[in-house]
Image: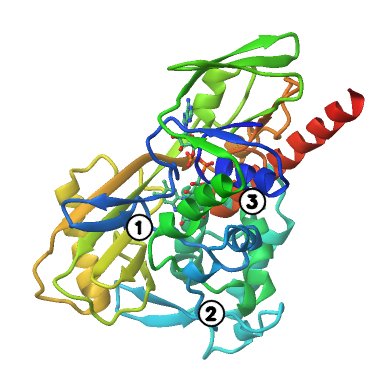
Amino acid sequence: MHIIGAGLSGLSAAVRLAHKGIPVTVHEAAGHAGGRCRSYFESELDCDIDNGNHLVLNGNHATLDFLRLIGAEDTVHVPSPADIPFVDLVDGTRWSVRPGKGRIPWFALSSLRRIPGTSLKDYLQSWRMMWATDTQAIKDVMPTGGVLWRRFWVPVIAAVTNTDPAAAGAATMRQVVVETLARGEAACRPVFFPNGLSRSLISPAVDFVTAMGGQVRFNHRLRGVQKINDTVSALEFVQDRVDLSDNDCVISAVPAAIAKDMFDGIVGPNAFSPIVNGHFRLKQAFDAPPLLAVVGGTAEWLFSREDVVSVTVSAAASLVDLPSETIAVRFWADIQAAYGLVGVAMPPFRIVKEKRATFLQTPDQLRRRPDCRTRWRNLYLAGDWTATGLPATIEGSIRSGAAAASAALDQVNKMSGST
Ligand SMILES: Cc1cc2nc3c(=O)[nH]c(=O)nc-3n(C[C@H](O)[C@H](O)[C@H](O)COP(=O)(O)OP(=O)(O)OC[C@H]3O[C@@H](n4cnc5c(N)ncnc54)[C@H](O)[C@@H]3O)c2cc1C
């Protein structure tokens, strides 16, 4: 079995197959695994950072299953109970989002537990998202104004869909709500990666695949494929070529634009959306919550890990083309206000701009997502851009890899049964 791409989708497929005893070779163009979800050494800050802060909740069951399977469950920190602090920089109001224990959001009945300035009616109106169809955007199903919108839905929908919240696909967002918020506190605990994304999600997955007898070949870029009739017959890499046998399957786990160029007839999303992250290395660690949502500033989410504070802004089209210095000044002003660090000089920073962080998750683009099966008998697709029913996230990527692995395995079983 050949897997193209060692991002989370490719690694998820490889891990599933290796676990079932199937020989796998993963071909990765870069010199490292992880794709859009990885850690690296940043010389400006003299420490490891993640390419972007990744917000994951423990209701993302495929992610937790994946961590368990690769033996990395102990590398994550999942504080309980769920309690996510927010600050509104416009007036300094602070509150915490603490979902209730059960499925019914009883907290919305109590003005003391609701987000400040919101009413029960606001929560009831949001519930209309539950009946969204695939063609509807968030703005078609719920009010996109008011305090609940500004203080809760904007930061949450932007983080989940990396799309202007009003324009984001409502049905995809509903699926996230069904799997997390609507299941209550026990499915809304943030999952933190204190040692970085690579040490939890990426390196243990590569180690698992190799320990099970598989291979991960780095700097091995696929540049084309050969096909005979309905079958991919050979993989052409920059350095060499691999001829495929009748029982070989290929799982493509490369981004949408690359898959479209590589394999004819693949339709996928063709509009993308940026995420901007800023990492600041303070002189010393300070006592801050690991996660803080920010409303009314430029920053949207602050992640704090020892002496590094990181800022995330999703759907960052209006920010991404500004000079890094300008972005850093804005981010630092928000960090100062949010953490009360007024007067502290801006420390060394690194701004990371991911221009194509994910595809743009509007209803039109979401409808372009393909199934994992293709018109080629032995070619399957994985990737956060395939039809997972979830937004382009870690959870979606891991599920896409698992779905492609299981479809490829069915084909292998069918072929070996027929020979
Ligand atoms: C800044 C940022 C912040 C994010 N925040 C969050 C978040 O908060 N929560 C969340 O859940 N998700 C988040 N995401 C999304 C998440 O990171 C992605 O959905 C996920 O990493 C996508 O994985 P993938 O394997 O589908 O694709 P990729 O990670 O893009 O992997 C594709 C791999 O294919 C390789 N490749 C490409 N071409 C070839 C070729 N020709 N031959 C061989 N290999 C090739 C690439 O090098 C890459 O390793 C964020 C993403 C970014 C960029």
In which quadrant will I find the N terminus? top right
Q: Is residue 276 above or below residue 297?
A: above
Q: Residue at x 46, y 52 (%)?
A: 203
Q: Horizontal placement of 252 versus 286: left or right?
A: right
| Numbered label attached to residue 172 | 3
The three-letter amino acid code for the residue at tag 1 is: Thr
The three-letter amino acid code for the residue at tag 3 is: Thr
Q: Horizontal placement of 152 versus 348: left or right?
A: right
Are there few (<14), some (14-19), or many (20+) residues within 10 Å of tag 3?
many
Q: Earlier in the sequence, mark 3 or mark 2?
A: 2
Task: State how far apart marks 2 and 1 are (Cα).
Answer: 20 Å
SS for callout 1 = strand
| Numbered label attached to residue 82 | 2
Q: Are marks 3 and 1 in contact (CB under 8 Å)?
A: no
| Numbered label attached to residue 312 | 1
Are there few (<14), some (14-19), or many (20+) residues within 10 Å of tag 1?
many
Name the one closer to the observer, 74 or 289: 74
SS for callout 2 = loop
Residue 107 image offset from top left, x and y in percent: 61, 85
Q: Horizontal placement of 265 versus 281: left or right?
A: right
Q: Residue at x 63, y 59 (%)?
A: 69
- Residue at the far right: name it: 418
Q: Residue at x 51, y 34 (%)?
A: 5
